[in-house]
Amino acid sequence: MVVRTILFLSTLLLCSCYEQFIEVGDLDLDGAPKLVVEGILHAGHTPTMHLSALRSIEGNDLAPGDIRDAEGFLLQGPDTVDRFIYKDKGVYVLENDSIIKAGQSYSVHFSAEGFSEVHSDDVLVPDRPPSVVTSFDINSCILGVNDFQSCLLQISFSEPTHDVMLEFSPSPTLERRARPSISEKLAPVCQEVNQGYTKFNPLECLKLGNIDYFLPHKLDTAKYGDQSYTHYELRVGNISSSYFNAMEDLKEKESYQNSLLFEPSLTYTNIRGGTGFLGAVNDTTLIVELE
Amino acid sequence: MHWELLGLFTYFGVSKGFLTICTLIIGSSCFSQDTVIVSGEIRARESDESIYDAYILMDDQIMDSSNPSGAYEFSTSKGNHILKITHTGYQHGQWEIDLQRDTHLIIWLEELQLPEVNVRADRILEPSLTRLEMKDLKKIPMLLGEPDPIKALTMLPGVSQGLEGFAGIVVRGGGTDQNLILMDNLQLYQKGHLLGFTSPMNQEFLESITFYKNYFPPQYDGRLSSVVQGNTISNVDSFSTEVSVGLINSGFHIGRPITKGKSKLQLGGRTSYSGFVLSPFLKSSDPHESTRTKIFFYEFTGKFEHRFQNNSSISILSQFSRDRISQLTEGKKLFPNQPTETRATHVSIPSFAISTSYQMDFGRRWHLESSLYYNSVSNRYTNEGQTPIESSLNTFEINNESNLATWGHKSILSFQEKSWSYNFGLQNEVHSIGPQKISGHLEDAGRTTNLVKNPQSLRSYVNSGFIEFEKNYREIKLYGGLRFNHYHYNDFSTSYLNPRAGIEIGYENKLSFWYVQNNQFLHSVESLNSLIPIDILLPSTGDLQPQRMSQISVEYAFSLGRTRDVRYSISTFYKKFSQLSQIRPGEQILFNLNANWTDFLVSGGEGNAAGIEVSYIQDFTKAKLNLNYTYTRSIREFPDVNAGDTFFANFDRPHYFVLNFHSSLGPHWILGLTAHYASGVPVTLPSALSNGLSGYTPVYFSKNNYRLPDYHKVDVQFSRTWVSQGQATRENTLTVGVYNAYGRKNLISIYYVGTTRRTGNVSGKFSGYSFLRFIPILSYRLSW
C-alpha cells in the first residue's frame, strides 16, 4: 500500500512539472521616450536623415511615431553646414541641398519636443571609393537542380581596404534594395598570415583582399521558367566604421533572435542622447555582364 | 574527582563514560623545582585518530592546543589544578588533577553526535575550512534524492547556486568557473552531470568534503574563489556494498580489502536511465515544432590503495564519465510532398582522470606525499539537419569540438613539531588545449561545401612552488605561506608571488582575519544563454592575461547557552578581481568558422565583491536548525563591455537566505526541510524597440539591466532507515519527499519574442523558462 501510494504520488507530481514557457509581464525596463536617428552621409550627394521614436518593448508607442517637428542641423565641428527640414514619413532633408564632401567630418544635431536633444559623433566620410577589379569567367558557373546556375564573380581590391560594402542589383529585373545587403571586412585574408591566431588589427593589415561571390545567373526553371539574370550593377563603397558597426550589429541581432548561442551585446549607436547611427560611404558603381 | 598521579603507566576509566585518560609519569621534573611539564596526546575514542586543535585549559587559562598529531605540551606549577579539554564536535572534559612531577596524559574524547557541519582537522594544514560529512548530507533534501556534495555547499553562508539547469556554485560574488574541485588529488573540470543536477563526484566514494573560502592554503591555486576538496573513503576494512536507486539515476559502490590491512579496492558507478524529468526543459519554444530530447550520463570510479611495510603507501584513483544530450526537432512542412525540416543537436562530453599518489612517513615528524595526475575533457557538439528549399533539399552537418588535457605533478613535504607545522611543495602542470575544431559539410542547391577548421593544439605550462606554515600559540593561531607561480604560453611568460596569511584568536569564541591572493590561468568560455552546456577552457596569453584575485575577510564565531548549543558566526569580506575575462558580446561560440578562439573572450576586466555572512546554528535534543543569510554585491567593469560602464556580475545575488532543519521522528524516521530565498540574477534584455530604416529592432541599452524574479522554494523529505537481517545485516534507507514543494515558478532565463502583425506593427513579449516544480524525491539505498 505504501509503495503504491508513493508511485501514485510520484506520477502525479511528475505530471505537474512540465510547464516551462511562462509569459512574463510588466518588466520595469528603461523604456523612456528617445529619438532614433539614422542616416548615411553619401559622398557627392545630399543626405537624408530618418527620425523615429523608440517604442516600448511590447510594441506600444511611447511617443508619436512620426517626428514632424524636430529641429536638426548638419554640422562640421561647431559650424552649421545646413538645416534639416521635414519631408515625409520621418525623413528629413537639407534645406539648401548641401552636398557631402569626401574626406570631411560631419555630425548631426536634432531636438524635438518631448525628447532629449541628440547629437552624433563626428563621422569621417571616406576620401575615395575603393579601387576594385572584377573578373568573371563563364566557365566558373555551376549547375544546380532544375537548371539553376550560379557563376563566380571575383572582386579584387588593388589597394588596402578596411571596411567595404557591396550591393548587387540584378537590373532591371529587381529594384535596388533599400540598404546594403552585404558588408564585408577583409579580415579573413589578413588572418591567414599567423595561422588564424593573431588578433586582426585592420590598421596593420596591408595585404590586399579578394572576395568571391556566386551570383545567380539562370533561375530555377520549375518555378521561374526560362529566366536569367545577365546584368548586375555592383556598388562598392568604402564605409565609415560607424556604418560597418551598425550593419554588423543589425546582422548580429537578426541572428540571435533565433539562437541561444549568442551573448547579447548592446545596440551599436553613435547618437548621444538617443539611439541610431550616422554612417558615411564613398562608393562607385560597376556593371557586371554575365554573358 | 581527584587523582593522585603516581606510578608508571596507568589507565583510567573516567566519569560519564565519555573520556578516558592514560597517564605516564615521566621521571622527575627537569624544568624547575616548582614547575612540571605536562605533555600528551588528544585522540578520538571511537576511531583512535588524533584530534587536532583541541584546547587544553588549566584553571581556565589556555595552556596549549593540540597539533595535527594530537600532541600538546605546556608547563605549569605543581599542585592541584582544574584541567579542561575542549574541542568542537567532542564532549568537553573537566577534571581536578594533582601534578607533582612531569606528566604525560593521553586523552580520548568521545565524539558528539553532531549533524551537518563538523569542523575537524586532517593531517594537512586546513585552517578556516568547513568540513561536510557525507553521512550528514543524507539528511538534507536534495533533488533526485541523492546527497549532492556540491549542491550541499549552497547551504553554507557565502555560497549560492548559480542557476538551476546550469552546473556550478557561486562563492562570494565569483563565477561558477572559479571553484577548484578536487577528489583527493584529482582535479575535475566538470562542474556536474545531467545539466548540473548531479555532482561531478560520485558521492558513494566520498567520506567528506572540505571547503575553503576564507583562506586557501598555498598548496591550492588555479581558481579564484574557492577550493572544494572531496575526501574519498579511507576506512575499507571489510567487504561493503552500497546500492542506490533513484528516479533518474542509480549508483553503486563496492569496497573490498584485498590483503587485510594492506591493500584495498573500491569500485563505483552511476548512470542515469531516464532524462524524462529534465528533457521537457529543452523543448523548442516554437509551438509549430516538435522536439524530442534525451539526456544521459554514466560514470565509473575506481580506487586502489596499498600500504607497504616501510610506512609508505600508494593509491591510484581514476574516473571516467560521459554526458550525452540529444535533441531532435521537426519543424513545419514548408512545401507539400517534401520532407519536413529537421534539425538535431548532439552534445557529448567525455572526461577521463587518473592520479597516482605515493605517501611516506620519515619518523614522526616528516611526511612526503607525491602525486602524478592526468585529466582530460572534451566538449563535442554536432548540428545536423535538412531544410527543403524550393525544389531542392539542403542538408548540413557540422561538428564542433574543444578539448583540454592536463598532465600534472604535485609533491608536498610536511614537517610537524609541537606547535609548528610546515609544508613545502612543488606543482607542475601542462595544459594541452584544442579550442575549436570544426568539420562538416553543407549541401546547398546541389553544391557541396566542406567545412574544415582545425587549429593546432595550444600548450601552456604552470610551474609552482609553495611553502605554508601554521603556528599555535595558546589561544592564537597563525597561518601563512607563499605560492610562486610561473606561467608560460608560446612567447608569453609571467610570474606571480601570492602571499596568504591568517590569524585566529580565541578558542570557543573565535575571531579570525584572512588575506589571500591567487591566480587562475584557464579562462572559461561559458554561455548562460544556451540551455546546452557550453564550457570551454582557454589558456592565458599576452592579450588574455591570467586572472587574479585578492581577498580580505574577517570572521567572528561564538557560542551561547549553557551547553553551547547555539552557535553564531558573522563574517565579512572584500575581494578584488583583475584581468577577468568574459564571453565577448555578440560572439557566436559554436559552429563559427569565422571566429578565432582569441575572439571568444574579452579581457582586461576588473571587478570587486563585498558582502556580509551571518550564520545561526542551534542544536536541540533530536533536531538541528541552521539559518544562513548572505548579503553580497559583485560588480564588473570591462573596457569592451557595456560601453565601458560598470555592471552587476552575472551571478550577483544581493540576498541569499537558507534555512535547513532536520529532526528525528522516532527511531527510524528523519524529517529534513530546506528553504531557499535568493534575489534574482541579472540578465540582459532589450529595453525598447527601434522602428527605423531596418524595421522593428530590439534595442539593448545596457548589460544586465534586469533581474530575474526572486528565487524561492521549500524542499521536504522523509527518510526511513531500518536494518534487515539475512545472511548479512543490511541497512535500508528509503527517502521520499518533494523538491519545490509549493510549486514556485522560478525562472532561469527570460527571452524576447517579437511578432509582426498584419498591420506591420510589432507586438512583443517576454517569455521565460520556469523550472522544476513539485519534483518528487524518491530513492532507495541498500548497504551491507
Image: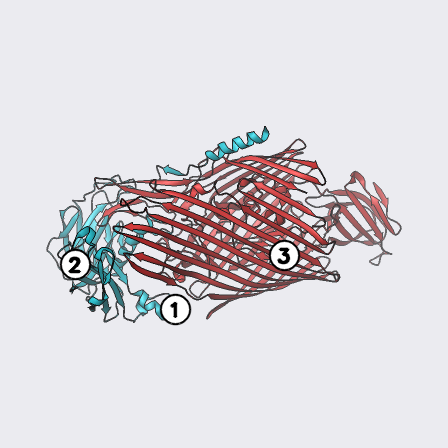
Q: Colour of chain A?
A: cyan
Q: Chain of mark 3?
A: B
Residue at 81 percent across and 42 percent down: it is: B14
Q: Colour of chain B?
A: red
Which residue bears the numbered disc 3?
Answer: B479
The kind of secondary structure element at disc 1 is: loop
Give x and y (percent) for residue B781: 62, 40
Depth check: give the residue in front, B65 or B282: B282
Quadrant where the image shows the N terminus of chain B? top right
Which residue bears the numbered disc 2?
Answer: A229
Q: Chain of mark 1?
A: A
Distance Cα–Cα, label 2 vs label 1: 39 Å
Depth check: give the residue in front, B18 or B614: B18
Q: Amino acid at mark 2?
A: Tyr
Tell which circle, 2 or 1, labels the residue nearer the N-terminal end.
Answer: 1
Quadrant where the image shows the C terminus of chain B? top right
Q: Amino acid at mark 1?
A: Gln
Q: Chain of mark 2?
A: A
Tell me if I can see residue A258 in this picture: yes
Q: Point out the frontmost of discs 2 and 1.
A: 2
Callout 3 environment at 10 Å: few (<14), some (14 to 19), or many (20+)? many
Q: Label for residue A195?
A: 1
The kind of secondary structure element at disc 2 is: loop
The kind of secondary structure element at disc 3 is: strand
Give x and y (percent) for residue B406: 53, 62
Q: Is residue B79 left or right of residue A132?
A: right
